Amino acid sequence: MLTRIILLSFLVLTLMMPGAAHAQQGQPKRSFIRDAEVENTIRTFTTPLFQAAGLAPDSVRLHLMVDPSLNAFVAGGLNMFIHTGLLIRADSPGQLIGVLAHETGHIAGGHLARIQDAAGNASTEALIGMLLGAAVGAATGRADAGAAVMLGSQELAVRNFLTYTRGEESSADQAALRFLDGTGQSSKGLAEFFEILGDQELLVTTRQDPYVRTHPLTRDRISAVRDHVAKSSFSNIPPRPEWVEMQRRMRGKLFAFIEPPFRTLTRYKDNDASLEARYARAIALYRKPDMAAALPAIDALLAERPKDPYFWELKGQMLFENGRGTEALAPYAKAVELLPESALMRIQLAQVQIEQEDPALLAEAQKHLALAVHQEPDNRTGWRLLAIAHGRDGNEGMAAYAMAEQALIEGRLPDASFHAGKAERLLPKTGEIWLRIQDIKERAAQAADEQKGQRRRR
């Protein structure tokens, strides 16, 4: 089931590296999330930084990792991984933006290529594949999507793989300071973050956040950032008020979805009338579940902010997940109306429409899903639901095409070829979809040949 925040448990993946099969029992699982509001907030913060770095903002893929530790890193090309621990524990937009600027500095400095070249062994591809495979699984919205658990020596290998040199860290710092100045933002947040890390260096290694272990911190680095803050003409510029609200909402929302409801209600007490506190309490109440209190809580927020798509989305989710799918249609439709560019929201609305088993809703569900997979071609949940919608509508050719796309994304090459062949027989042999079917067949055949070649080389 699609949920507002999708928690994906990983399947164990044995890697070709020493000790990988000896993962310790009891290690916590890693998960990834997809959420329109959280992703849009981070996109808002990173877009100016990417532009200042000469990067096309849409070319950098953001992956949100459910992990309480303070960490962020880049890997496997233009991929930035951000722990929810960082998002929740950052006290201000400036602290978070400072970290994101630093990670952008690693991308702009070409440090990823150096790491990959230096690794130069069979585990390199496996390590990146473990990270990206799990993140791609998150993009699907499927709790059963194959991913990986980073356990024991696997996690140690990943940490070593992602460790930067002190020279690269200083280079990324200087780049971050340029990006922040170039976008007219203060660097105080980055300095504050370094102070937090400095305190962590006093802890034993097992209690340190992974950011300290993978991003070596030195007094020279701290001094350089402090000196820049003292000299920069942008240091006293406060963050935009709307960014402050976005960051606080994101932090409260993540806490409420990840932590048990009682912890949320303890942290955000009834006497806290701030928007983020009322938002977090509404989420906690629905998760208890206490719908008698949750619905009035979200309705109060909607009365105050009737054009907030994320509040409408939450109300839709509350209703849908409590067996009130017909009532959920209107809130989800309103969320899509207010934020039409959100593929995730369109997928959620389409799923509710499909599950009503009303033939009159299928055409609209197909429209939402077609737009969603056009925006996110690798979203296998979108393709899966599109196949269901076309199948229930009696269009076997389009259902087969959608299943071929899903199978190709999931690496099920024989299935991709089978469904593509069926679609080719049933659909007109002209147009964009027919060309795409040929592409799927060719890509599946090429991938199968590559796999055979790899097996022979072993």
Image (spheres, grey):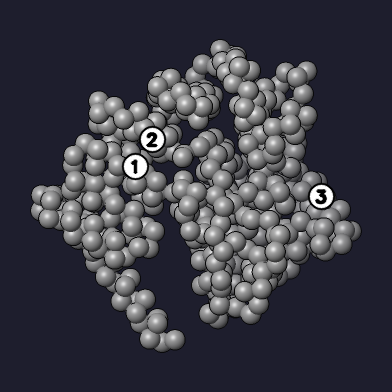
Instruction: Classify 415 as above or below 313.
Output: below
Q: Cβ–Cβ below 8 Å for labels 1 and 2?
A: yes
**Could you tell me residue 5's position as x and y percent?**
55, 39
- Please give the name of the residue rendered at 62% of the width and 74% of the height, measured from the top-left corner: 21
Which callout, 3 or 2, points to the residue nearer the camera? 2
**Could you tell me residue 55's position as x and y percent?**
49, 54
- Please give the name of the residue rendered at 66% of the width and 60% of the height, measured from the top-left corner: 172
Residue in front for this viewpoint, 322 or 234: 322
Q: Cβ–Cβ below 8 Å for labels 3 and 1?
A: no
Report the residue marked by disc 1: 385
Q: Earlier in the sequence, mark 3 or mark 2?
A: 3
- Please give the name of the residue rendered at 51% of the width and 16% of the height, measured from the top-left corner: 306
Q: CA distance from mark 1 to mark 2?
A: 7 Å
Q: Residue furthest bottom?
A: 457
Amino acid found under the numbered disc labelled 2: Gln
In the rendered structure, find residue 196 and report the number of the disc placed on it: 3
Report the residue marked by disc 2: 351
Which callout, 3 or 1, points to the residue nearer the camera? 1
In the rendered structure, find residue 398 and report the number of the disc placed on it: none
**Could you tell me residue 253's position as x and y percent?**
63, 33
Q: Is residue 136 left or right of residue 366?
A: right
**Could you tell me residue 170's position as x and y percent?**
72, 63
Q: CA distance from mark 3 to mark 1?
A: 45 Å
Q: Residue furthest left?
A: 429
Label 2 secondary element: helix
Instruction: Classify 87 as above or below 455.
Output: above
